[in-house]
Structures are given as C-alpha cells and as structure tokens.
Amino acid sequence: MKYYKKKLIIEKINFQSLAHKFGTPAYCYSYSKLKENINKFKENFKSFSPLICFSVKSNTNVNLIREIKKFGLGADVVSKGELMMALKAGVPPSKIVFSGVGKTIEEINFAIEKKILLINAESKSEIQEINKIAKRKKKIVKVGIRLNPNTDAKTLKQISTGKSENKFGVNSKTFYELVNYCKNSKNINLQCLSVHIGSQILDHKPYEKMLKVVSNIINKTKHSFEFVDLGGGMGISYNKKIKKKLSYKKYNSAIKNFLRKHDTKIIFEPGRSIIGDTGTLISKIIYIKDGGSKKFIILDAAMNDLMRPALYGAIHKILPVNKSNSVSRYIYEFVGPICESTDKFVTLKKFQKLKESDFVAICDVGAYGMSLSSNYNLRPKPVELLIKGTNIRVIKDRQKHSDLI
Ligand code: LLP
C-alpha cells in the first residue's frame, strides 16, 4: 500500500476507484502482501521445515484460506465451523489441527470422521471424552495435549493465554497425568505437545522461556512426541513509530536449540503474521460533526465491522485515500455510527483536512477484522475484495438487508 500521484493504492488499483465501484465499507486484501508474508515466514524457519497451520480464526474467508493452502499451509481450527471451512477451501485433513477448550461431542465426532492430523485436547474431561468416542468408533485417534506453561507473553492482558490464571491448556501436573492416561489407552495415540502463550507478541524472550518449560516437561515425561505445536502469536507492527519488532532470528535459534535436544517436528499456528497487514478497510465519511474541542469524523464503518479498537483499545492507522498538503487545525476523532461510546477508532491531533464524502483507509485489518465482525445494530457485513495486480476479485459479497430481515 502506498501513494501514487497522491492516491492511495493497493497493488495496482487505487482505493478510490474500489470505493466507487464496490461501495463502502469494504475490506480489501493484497495478494502480493499475502504471498510475501507466507514466503518470509517459511524462509525464517526453513532449517527445520515446520508444518505451518494458518489460524483460521484470524480470517475465515474461504477464498483466502484457499490461496493460503496453495502455498502448502495447513489450518488451525477451533470449531466445527472453522473445520468445515478449512475442508471446503481444500486444506488436506492431514494438515489440520483442532484446538479449543470446549470442543463438544459433535465437534470431536466430526474431527475424528474427517481424520484430521491432531485434536489438541485442553483438559482431562476432553481427553476422556475423546477416548470414549474413539472406543465406540473402534478407532485410534491422534491427539495432542495443550500445556499451559505459565509463561507471561508480555502482550495485552486480553490476548494472553499462557499464564496459569488463563483457561487454556493444562498445568504440568495434569499434563503428566494425561500422558499416562493416553499411554494406557488403546484408542488414543498421543503425538503432540501443544502450547500457545498469546497473541501480538513482539518480544522473543517469552518464547524462549516457554521452550525451556516445554523441554523440561518433555524430559520428565520420557514420551517421544512426534510433534511440538508452538501455536502462533507472532506480532506485527501496527504503528511504525513503535520500534519494537519480534526477532524471528532469535525465535528461530531458540527453536533450533530446542531441536538439538528433542527429535520432533514443529507445528506453527500463525494467524496475524500471515494475514494482518494484507487487509485494509475503506470507509466513507458520512458526516463531520463539531464536538467542541474536536471534530467527530463519522464514518460508515463501525465497531461491528472492525471490533478490535472497541474490544482491546487497539489502534489502527488511518490514512486519507486522496492525499493533500493541507493540515487540519482540529483534533479529529474517527467514530462509527453505532450507538455505543466505544464505537470509536482513533483520535488524531494532526491530520489533513477532511470533508464529508471523503474516503479513508483503516490499515492492517486482515486479521481479526472481518472474522470478529457482527451484525450489531442490524448492519450488513462489508464486501471483501482480493486484489492481485490490476485484478479485482469479490471474495465475499456485501450482505444485503434482505439477508438479515
Ligand atoms: N493458536 C491458538 C491456539 C490461538 O488461540 C490463536 C489465537 C492462534 C493460534 C493465532 O494467533 P496469532 O498468530 O494470530 O496471534 N482477537 C484478538 C486476537 C485473539 C487471538 C486468539 N488466539 C485480536 O484481535 O488481537
């Protein structure tokens, strides 16, 4: 994404023409950015050729999952719906892992029927349930156990998952107990230890710590794990002013160190680092309203289209679609039309002068943008477009009111 002759462009198309043609709000994804992210990810860890399972929760668009699959990636799913979507996109079951603290009997049944690579169980009750179902079906089911390593991911509290106070995984004591349970079961084949300590991680040290914990626990169990699933969580740069960046090099060498002691295959479950910066939400200014010390820029995109600011206080960069050299003397607060005070994207002190009907681009919304969207206030969901050079593909139609009413 860059400016060309003062127009913001994605690949070879300018956002303004997309807005005119497809209406707003609209999610636009860049194919070349997606390709670049996947290739970079693979390159970073190529020495041990991990299985990379795209975390479908970050973006559930079937056409995007299909493109990602073409690069050889598998899928990490957390519900029957996501599993069905990954299969619909053509992801081979042998590359699908299923996580989640509350898999229902129906979901476990479905995963077993589809012969996916691993069901990563997160509690004693779940392992017992899998065992019961597998026994009834006279099948041997490949499972992983998710460990809660009690490691601080040093990220937002709301997206930390690896501390003992979090609901995810099991502690080391239960882990040992479950390893024994699996060893004694004829219907369970324990193949994996999985962990995921959180999301939007920008420091490699929590990963290093987590690997140490995992290494110790594997040593104690004396079980040979075919896979160690390290989850996802690799953070991206939402704000170029924040210099902190995850060092893939250091994470990679920590894993290589780990692999010197353990003969196992690594699985990753990245979401944001694959799809996050590929997506942009274009929106039109409906009204500009005087708010005393500031001006409210009322957009046609709202918290139902992009929930992250309201839910986590996340900040997404906003750019004008047509650049000018003017600077507004007002503070701008970019808000949506929804009846909630948290329906607010960002407040900016310095921005170019804007007028009603102008378009703006909300950046880096490819992950947890559309997938967290809702129909709150009975607002139809935006159209999704995939841009490849000069080619534009509608990868999901805009919802119509008639779909909702
Ligand atoms: N694996 C597991 C088990 C997970 O729970 C998650 C994310 C991932 C992989 C992918 O993590 P990623 O590579 O995308 O960081 N809605 C929040 C993020 C929630 C993440 C939930 N789990 C946000 O908008 O920031």
Image (cartoon, rainbow, N blue to C red):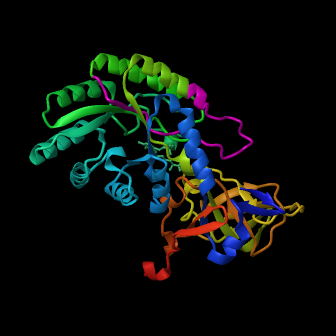
The residue lying at 62 percent from left, 53 percent from top is 32
Q: Is residue 205 visible to us here?
A: no
Residue at the image point whose x is 19% and y is 31% from the top: 182
Give the quarter of the figure containing the C terminus.
bottom left
Does residue 359 appear in this view? yes
> Magenta segment, which residues?
224-251
331 horizontally vs 23: left or right: right
Q: Is residue 240 above or below residue 19?
A: above
Q: Is residue 182 above or below residue 322?
A: above
Quadrant location of residue 191? top left
Front position in the image: 359 or 163? 359
Query: What's the residue at 76%, 75% (across, down)?
Result: 356
The image quadrant that residue 264 belongs to is top left
Residue 44 is covered by the magenta coloring: no
Relative to 348, is 125 on the left or the right?
left
Q: Is residue 233 magenta?
A: yes
Q: Is residue 357 left or right of residue 373?
A: right
Residue 9: give x, y in percent of width and height. Answer: 73, 62
How many numbered marks does the figure carry?
0
Residue 132 x %, y %:
13, 43
Q: Nearer the viewer, residue 128 or 3?
A: 3
Q: Is residue 403 above or below residue 4?
A: below
Front position in the image: 343 or 86: 86
When the figure is inspected, residue 267 is found, relative to residue 206, above or below; the finding is below
